[in-house]
Amino acid sequence: MKKSKEGKPVKGFTFSGVASGIKATGRKDIALIISYTPATVAGVFTKNSVKAAPVIWSQSVAKNGICRAIVVNSGNANACTGDRGKADTKEMASIVAKRVGCKLREVAVSSTGIIGVPLPMDKVRKGIEKGLQALSPACFSEAAEAIMTTDTFPKSSTVDIAVAGQKVRLTAMAKGSGMINPNMATMLAFIVTDVAITQPLLKEALAESAEFTFNRITVDGEMSTNDTAMILANGAAQNRLINKKGKDYNLFKDALLFLSADMAEKIIRDGEGATKFVKIGVKGAETDATALEVANKIANSSLVKTAIFGEDPNWGRIVSAAGSCKAKVYFDKIDLLIGTIPIISTGRPTGQADKGSVKKYLKKKDIAITLNLNLGKGEAEVLTTDLTYEYIRINSAYSS
Amino acid sequence: MKKSKEGKPVKGFTFSGVASGIKATGRKDIALIISYTPATVAGVFTKNSVKAAPVIWSQSVAKNGICRAIVVNSGNANACTGDRGKADTKEMASIVAKRVGCKLREVAVSSTGIIGVPLPMDKVRKGIEKGLQALSPACFSEAAEAIMTTDTFPKSSTVDIAVAGQKVRLTAMAKGSGMINPNMATMLAFIVTDVAITQPLLKEALAESAEFTFNRITVDGEMSTNDTAMILANGAAQNRLINKKGKDYNLFKDALLFLSADMAEKIIRDGEGATKFVKIGVKGAETDATALEVANKIANSSLVKTAIFGEDPNWGRIVSAAGSCKAKVYFDKIDLLIGTIPIISTGRPTGQADKGSVKKYLKKKDIAITLNLNLGKGEAEVLTTDLTYEYIRINSAYSS
């Protein structure tokens, strides 16, 4: 597996990213991803009851299993926009379908940005036309830039593998960066690959990868109306078709897991206002599910997050957050580590928390907190950020 | 029912609040509440699995049903302090019991402040002695001050009622002000009354009042290790004993509900860093429980809270938070009001959100948001604050 921390051209795909004027700043806001041939598609989507029109549309594309193109706009989520929003999504797909020469339901649509404001369709129409003119296999990075909202850098990554001697490439783009939470909070990720694989296996590989990557990150505990991760596999690599589980499938799944993990990590590193990249590991829970509950509770605790921002070894907040879960936590049994420094050992504070070594560790950008409940074998890891003045600034001034 | 927004002397009770040096600032940090005669007691306590030593102790006092005194320290939660914490709690009770001449288990103990640091018992011992010297029926406000942590003002309130012609008084003190969340996040409330009532009825009245007051407030979604609300009823009013449900009981319960609601409101008005007092009302849910789930989700949403801080009518965040609940929310059905201004009417934005009237309304300190799901008759109301720079400042600099 050859990894590269940037997007690269993939056989049979063409991309573009252009500015249509949806964003008042004049930044790129329309992205196109087009496969020359019908690609196998799979997707995972927000579990929010209130789903944006493009999410409902793209769910049906993923269900059909065949996709030729993805059209994305940033700056406006087309969420809570009623019948007009549905019509606008359909029109976006329609413009692309006509030019690509495919069925309407073979064009996926994604939108991200402010909720509840109808799309400025005159700009969107012209923007898509402009994007169709700008298509090029080399324009991956322009597309990755065009899907950004409050992101401070574009996120992409590539993996090359060999499937039965044939070179196969997967490349991914993603955007964050607030409203990130388990179950696909405002994030978009698009992965394209030239691998030949059946749709059920593509779907399974994506679902499994997403579960341990995109669904294990949280900035602020918010789950958005628009979250989407989709993968298109067009078979242009002409590898031996992956049609059963085994060596080839595992190779592909590992590559997809790596890409998804890398996107998830980049989203957290670019979390709104974040100054820290925080790994919360929970071990020794009764089940993986309870470990995940505890890890999420700690990761979403405003008091834990502000303590990390303040580089303050206030471990009581970690324990209190853990204890407030439905899952049982016995203080007498727990071990807590900040980095590799033991802070609590079977319920006894070690006295290390006040020492210089912990304070020095907390000055780093990457922080790991590990809680062992010592009850069983369940474990989970969640990535999060600290909670900062800058988060407040960004989010108290977002729409106005 | 005669209401007074301050604490007042209650027959048969004596109070004190003194500084022992637990708080580095030299502020008051030891409070005593003593009844001249054995009082009937009831309590509600944090549901956090990790309970501080004094919580476990006071639960057993409440279970026994008889209490002569409450001793409280602020500045240190005596939580996660192991066997030493248990011994320290017992010693605090013991010092008071000896001087009051009651059983050890008739003295309740409460602590609030930093977690995981052993109590400085030399200071605590001297502080309790000092408090015992300072006892006076008139010192209610000193006690109310001594239970404060990051509170910016003491919280107390009094209600006078007549039970079968006999004058009865209830008076309450409480502290917040961060880590406030449903199910008794870091808050303490102590209510004393001279009413004569049986213990089972006192317990029921407190549990019901707490459910709709202390358990309906949230600052940051945190549930603490130390939350406690206790009521002592010493019967000094010599009213006809309330020993069954009926007119007398209802009168008393209404008074207790008023007091609890007033304490809950004051805690929210003094929420850490808060600039706004926010009422989230959810109506038309399938059940009261789902209404409460939705109201809490909105109230704890960092994006909603920062929007309110920014006086930004970004209603998409409210809808997205509601939609991320387990409870079903159908956007097509909802009505949303900010104040009395309709923002969404059966799923259609009214266009009012961008108007000056909403922006003017959001400049007020008291904000009401009402969401009607139009699915059933369930309803709930939750009080919360905005999320501000000041919250970050307070909590990133708390212990260090």
Image: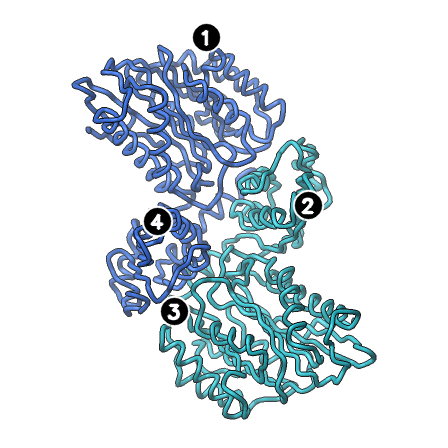
Chain colours: A blue, B cyan
Is B145 situated left or right of A62 in this image?
Answer: right
Q: Secondary structure at mark 3?
A: loop
| Badge 3 amino acid | Cys
| Quadrant of the rendering where the C terminus of chain B is positioned | bottom left
Q: Using the numbered discs, state the Cα–Cα distance from disc 2 to disc 1 in whole angstroms.
A: 48 Å
Label ID, residue A209: none
Kindly report the distance in space between the C-alpha atoms of the residues bearing marks 4 and 2. Answer: 39 Å
Query: Which residue does the numbered mark 2 point to in the structure image?
Result: B283
Q: Residue at x 41, y 68 (%)?
A: B115
**Residue with the most extreme right position:** B165
Residue for badge 3: B80
Quarter of the rendering occupied by the N terminus of chain B: bottom right
Type of the residue with mark 1 = Arg
The mark that comes first in sequence, 1 or 4, is 1
The amino acid sitting under disc 4 is: Lys
The chain containing the residue under callout 4 comes to A
Q: Which comes sooner in the sequence, label 2 or label 3?
A: 3
Q: In the rendered view, does A83 fall on the left or right side of A382?
A: right
In the image, B369 versus A206, the foreground residue is A206
Residues behind callouts 2 and 3 on a single chain: yes
- Label 1 or label 3, whichever lies nearer to me, is 3
**Residue A99: numbered disc:** 1
